[in-house]
Image (cartoon, rainbow, N blue to C red):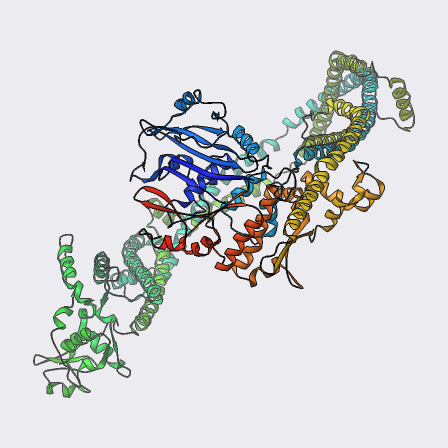
Amino acid sequence: MIKLKRLLLIHWQAYDFQLVEFEDITLITGQTGVGKSTIIDALNIVLLGEKQKHIFNKAANENSNRTLESYLYGKLGDDGGDGFFYLREENFTSYLVAEFENEETSEYFCCGFVADCNSDHSPPNLQWLTMKSRLPADYFLNQEEGIPYSISELSYQNNLKTESEKITLIVTDKDYRKKIAGLFGQIRDDYRRLLKQSVSFTPVKDIEMFLTDFVSETESPVNVEEMQKSIRRYNDLEQESDRINKKVAKLEIIKNEIQVLERRKIIELRQDYFIEKAKLELFQEQERNYHIEVENHKKEITENTHNISDASKRIAILTTKKEDLRDKRDSLVVLKDKVYLNSQIKSVKEQFQTIQDQTKRGQDTIHLMKRFINELNKLPIEISSIMGLIQTVEKYEKEQTLISKFTEVNDLMGQIVKKLDKYKDSISEQEIFVKSTLSSLSIEKEKLKQGIKMVPEQFRVFKEELQIYLRNYDKNAKVEYLSDVIDFKKGEENWQKAVEAYLGWQRYYLVIDPKFYNKALQYYQSVQKKREVHGIGLINLVKLQKKHFSAEQNSLAHKLMVRDHLVKAYINFLLGRVIACDDIMSLTKYQTSITTEGFLYKGFVTRKLQFKNLTMSVGSAAIEKQLLDAQEKFNERQEELCVLQKKIAILGELTDYQKKDMYSCEIVAEYADNQKFNQKANELDHLKNQLSNLDDSELVEIDGKIKYLDKEINDLSVVIKTMTEKSNERQTKIEQVNQELIPQCFEQIIKQEDIFQTKFEMCQQLSGFEEAYRVAINKLDNLVYQSFIINYENNQKQTQASISELEETIRELMNDYNQTFTENLPINIRQSNMYLEEYEKFMKSDLPKFELDIKDAKEKAIYEFRYEFLGKLKSNIENLYRQVDEINDALKNRKFGEDTYRFKITAASGYKEYHDMIMDEMLMDQGEWNLLSAAFESKYAQQIELLFTILSGNDLDEGKSKENRIQTFSDYKTYLAFDMLVKKGDSTQRLSKTYTQKSGGETQIPLYISLLAAFSQVYRVNNTLRNNTMRLIMMDEAFNKIDGEKIKQCIQMIRSFGLQAIFSTPPEKIAEIMEEADKALVVFRQQNQATLREFSSLDELIGEPYEV
């Protein structure tokens, strides 16, 4: 057995120099914070070969932030700024060295570290050390100066020592751990993990965690990364193969569509051949037709020339006959008389028309005058200023008198119209005023309907502005009219007119909260600077608070209802002495009195208050009464407006009359009586009679013959002109055809031949197209090239449309292909061969290659799945079974009181089928995996497939859930269920089911004992060979939930396991531990220095003046 004997602490936290001696069971105690855990942490560093902060002081404080530097420099706390206070501010050297004895060989060795520390508290220069002897007699101290050797000094001293005394300095943690593992008896590296866990041992309720973290040694961690790569490689290849197959499917559709497109293009080319060929033959046919047309025109010109000659001869004969007839006609006497009479009739007709027009104008003027005189009789009687004029005009009512006196009547009419114009203007102004009043009343009605009471504008504006002003001081400030805060009592409404007439403008006095009265006065005064405001009253409710005004029982004040007591006081003041009387004769009985009719007696005078135009403002019914009043006024004004508009309509017709000028008066006087009109009509009739009495029969006969000859000559002239024009047209057409159309047609033929040659010279289907063309032409009964061309052009358009649709479909397929597979092939019909090449490449090269790659990848994935996953899971599970069996063997014959303990591991619920697969004997065959054997694969096909899916990460989205699931199925613990069986007599209980029913100590003890068993396995205590090992176990804050008697039993159990134990515990547990301990060490602390003293008994410890 290798036993810890001593520990040297130099410059370690509060210990400047301390030598600690240990026995089989050593107790370290002291008050909290004195430095117990400091010693445990020092041993942790030495035994584990680690400097990380996570190994320090976890039992005392789970969130401890102790570090190696804080222990070395003696960190105390912050200095109030960015720094800290330290015990050691100068350069110094620290030592932590443990001394061990190999009891089997009686040899000693030491291990630990030396650290040179700097005054700036920078990371120290630390080197591990080992020795093959006991601690040196000088304890690494310079005897002259009494200070520790620095590393360089230690190296120098080392050169002076014997080989057995020499110190070995080690730089790296790894080399030191390897060295001490050999010194400690070549124990498994698990001791380091167990020591860490035991120091801060907090028994957990999770037996799985206890076994796997505290006990189990997992030598075959399952690394799924490479296997995942292979599985993913296989899946990727499968997916890529599937992707290529999908590509091929889409490319095949594109290929088929391209083939259809090519066939359509051949059809379109054949249709184009038919069209171009028909156009060429059409131009050739046109050329032939033009030559035929020229010959026909020439024939027509020759025929027209002969006909024109015959017609000209006939015109010459007829012209001679007509001249003879004219000479005979001119010799007749009656011709002269007829010419004279026609001339006279024409002149008289012109004079008659002028007289007729003037007569109509004069008579129209007389009729207008008579109508105006009749309209005057409709005028209202109130126009007295023109009634005398109207009576004068009525004397000339007869038409003959009116014509003879027209100038005089015209002057009278002018005077009447002027006066009517002025009267009309007056009526129009009244109309405007009434309309304006109606508009105001309409607005007033709308406001009243909205609940807005009508008050004089000056009062309304002042009230609103004052309220805004006061709300600058208090947002709840309110200004009200007196009329709004008072109302008539029920049954007293008949007094409303009398009260409102008596109050007058006082109804609109303003009621203000007393606290705002002075501010309101200031505002009233300030307003005068902008404009004069008068007649508005501010009621001083401040004064009324100090006054008490009562009202006579029969006064007007009792007719009103007032809620506010201050306003009530004001109403009493205002109306409390005004007595309400039933009749006028009772008024003089009182100093001031009033009746409902508005008769007021005051100051020895009785007078009537004005009710007309009085606006009701007091009380809740005021708005309703104002609305009724406004409606009544509105109706009156409407009636008034109708009367005015009727007058305006009558006056409008009269004022249209305009006084006639002097010329119009002369026309009336000269023509209106019809005398001149009748005279000229008689004269015209006389001339017409003379003309009708002439004998002109011979003249008429001669004129008829001349007229007939003129007609025949004219007809022949027309024929000559028509034929001449036709001949000219035909000659022009001949020239156009010869000079323009035939050359143009020839050019078109040449051009079309070139087009045809260019399009179809290299056409492989030319002979087939020509044969099909002739068949199509011959089928037609009546060949019309233009119809043939149009027909095939329409067919070609349909073909081209179908080609466009097909090309668009192909482009969409190309685009879909590129987007689906993130390709960058051109979306261009002209480059469609690239898609065909891609298709051929996949079919002939890529797909066969992928099939081989998939096969290889699958074999590799399955191989790694066998060896790297299932194999290691099986190995870890079997290893855990073995280790637990070993612990169970260690626990088998050990009782704690009446209890014995045994761990039990079974297949986890929900994962049993996987556990059975992993542990199945068929998995092994002559030392090789037999996963693909037919029986095994058939039996566990579903589990194998699911594990493949999980490990490849394809069953879940990216993220924690995916990684957690992979980690779960890669952890051998997933497939196991853990428990501890506690046997007492014939009764056996599962610890997992009794945690909640037992005390903390009862649940800790089984795991304490199991931890001891685990240590005994790691230290090989029960081995018959190679059992000369370190046996140390350390517990900080030990037995914190176990009572006294069971603590003793635990310590006895430690002895029975052959372990050396160091306990750090608070004072309340020392009574039980000291009875079983071989050595008791107590830590004392004065200020910043800690010391350690040994006590042999509890009595000696209690008698110590420094009370623990």
Which residue is at the front of the view, 408 or 67? Answer: 67
Query: Quarter of the image holding residue 589?
Result: bottom left
Residue positioned most to the left: 604
Query: Quarter of the image holding residue 261?
Result: top right
Is 484 located above or below residue 1046 in the figure?
Answer: below
Which residue is at the front of the view, 727 or 1009? Answer: 1009
Is 199 located above or below residue 574 in the figure?
Answer: above
Query: Quarter of the image holding residue 533?
Result: bottom left
Residue positioned most to the front: 106
The spot of residue 183 in percent (x, y) is 55, 33
Q: Viewed as shown, does residue 123 lie left or right of 770?
A: left
Magenta-colored stretch includes residue 994: no
The spot of residue 714 in percent (x, y) is 70, 25
**Residue 351 in view:** yes
Q: Viewed as shown, does residue 349 lie left or right of 550?
A: right
**Residue 614 in view:** no
The spot of residue 698 in percent (x, y) is 68, 33
Is 966 located above or below residue 499 in the figure?
Answer: above
Q: Viewed as shown, does residue 697 lie left or right of 37?
A: right
Q: Quadrant of the N terminus?
A: top right
The spot of residue 338 in percent (x, y) is 59, 35
Residue occupying image coordinates x 63% and y 37%:
1026
Which residue is at the front of the view, 107 or 129? Answer: 107
Q: How many marks?
A: 0
Which residue is at the front of the view, 314 or 661? Answer: 661
Q: Give, as a single range, the part of the protein colored magenta.
A: 781-790
Which SS type dominates the magenta stretch? Answer: helix
